Amino acid sequence: MPQPKAIIVGAGIAGIATAIRLAVKGFKVSVYEANAYPGGKLSEFEQQGYRFDAGPSLFTMPQYVDELFVLAGKDPRRYFNCQQLDTVCNYFYEDGTRLSAYADSEKLVEELSAKTNEDRENIRKYAANSRLIYDITNHVFLERSLHRLSTYLRWPTIKSIFRLPGIDAMRSMHKANTSFFKDKRLVQFYDRYATYNGSNPYRAPATLNVIPYFEQHFGAYFPDGGMYSITSSLVKLAEELAVSFYYNSPVEQIVVEGSKATGVKVKGDLVEAEMVISNMDVWFTYKKLLGHLPGIHPKKILQQERSSSALIFYWGISKQFTQLDLHNIFFSADYEAEFNSIWKDQTIGHDPTVYLNISSKLKADDAPKGHENWFVMINVPANKGQDWDALIDLARTNIINKLSRLLGEDITPLIQSESILDPRSIESRTSSYQGSLYGTSSNNQFAAFLRHANRSSKIKNLYFCGGSVHPGGGIPLCLLSAKIVGNLTPAIS
């Protein structure tokens, strides 16, 4: 019997992980990538002596990376290593407050209580509530398909259904957080976790208050070699498993015969396979790759509100700042106004919250000696035709003013090099519709159930992975989408 073939569209992190899982199952796997490099958003580049991880910079739950090596019978430590952070992030408020989010839970409680005068027990109760949401949702919503009857017939699912009121889906994150805390600074601290999947804490369900548990319980890490080493190590593993990667090879069409996916077209040529998995944003999958079959498009899903996007400045800075760490947040003075600008007005407010990542703090050769590589990001709306050039100019000025004020030094003359990534370039480089980072938003209490399934209900042998489908965006969830696809695909006899 000839070895069955599987084709994966896109070499993003979910596509690479899916390739590994299918290769282990015995498939001959080919990955077609439009760019000249793998990783999608999880890529890297260099400019004038500075190295930057282009996309995601917070790494949690490394066990999902290790799992792929173990699955292939390999020792993860021979391919990939990372160090756990003692301080997850530093926070700077406009009133002068500075918080350090320590990895040690009791140390974090003491820090938050001392800096905000919030009762320690309230902070501990909040952490317990976050864990409760995780316990209810994890094995049901994150690790299994929500679109198969068998998921709901399992005893763990049935138990979780009876506990559903505990996930707090009927009120917003912000409302839940104000019920726990009196101090507005602490409310803002926990509201920020909505941005981890591109959502609005004033609309997103309080179920998302599970996110602090991921960070606190499982920890935050920095990979040896930087974030891109996640991509490079998994590509190496995939290639050892005989996965073939074809770069500069955009897929033009998913070929469907009858109601069955039979391959793809690349550069006008037909490449046949028994299975096709799309790691491309589900919107572009239907509009471009399945555009010849409009009757099968899931219209309601494709019309869903998109997640927020990002504006990123990559700056080479000719100084080192001792008060900064790997991860740093500079909060806006009016958080609600910031989110109203993004979600209601579809623009960038005058005082955005600024995220600053400096990988050279832990990987010194990412910047010249005495310098730092600054990854400076703000949350912005998805691209709907705004005047981005004007918005970028204004945002750049406001960001520089904010950082200079809170750091006590004008950073303008310190900027030695600059690159910019905005929603337009995010869309063009990663095929993310409207430049949204996480596919559809999670601003609906039923968002977890409304994401696109990992397997097509209308086309046989067509599967979906990545941040635009179940269970969501971000590195851990993308890796879980690959795991779900791996479990859905048939075994080779």
Image (cartoon, helix red, strand yellow):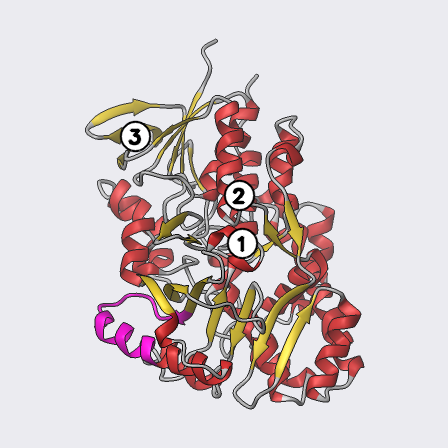
Closer to the observer: label 1 or label 2? 1
Quadrant in the picture for the C terminus = top right
Is there any visible trace of residue 257 in the rendered image?
no
Which secondary structure lies at badge 3? strand
Of residues 40 and 412, the one nearer the viewer is 412
Q: Which amino acid type corresponds to the residue marked 1 in the rendered image?
A: Ala
Q: Which amino acid type corresponds to the residue marked 2 in the rendered image?
A: Ile
Q: How crowded is mark 1: few (under 14 residues within 10 Å), some or many (20 or more)?
A: some
Give the residue number, with chain letter if any, for mark 3. Answer: 264
Residue plotted at (50% across, 54% down) = 472
Q: Earlier in the sequence, mark 3 or mark 2?
A: 2
Q: Which of marks 1 and 3 is nearer the N terminus?
A: 3
Percent position (x, y) of residue 487? 58, 35
Q: Give the range drawn in magenta.
A: 378-397
Label of residue 364 in the image: 1
Q: Does the magenta stretch include residue 155?
A: no
Task: Tell me where residue 411 sits by quadrant.
Answer: bottom left
Percent position (x, y) of residue 26? 53, 20
Position of 39 relative to 168 (above/below): above
Q: Is residue 385 magenta?
A: yes
* Residue closest to the far left: 268
Give the residue number, with chain letter if any, for mark 2. Answer: 230
Of residues 347 and 232, the one nearer the viewer is 232
Q: Which amino acid type corresponds to the residue marked 3 in the rendered image?
A: Val
Position of 334 relative to 87 (above/below): below
- Between the C-alphas of marks 3 and 2, the distance is 28 Å
Label of residue 50 in the image: none
Which secondary structure lies at badge 1? helix
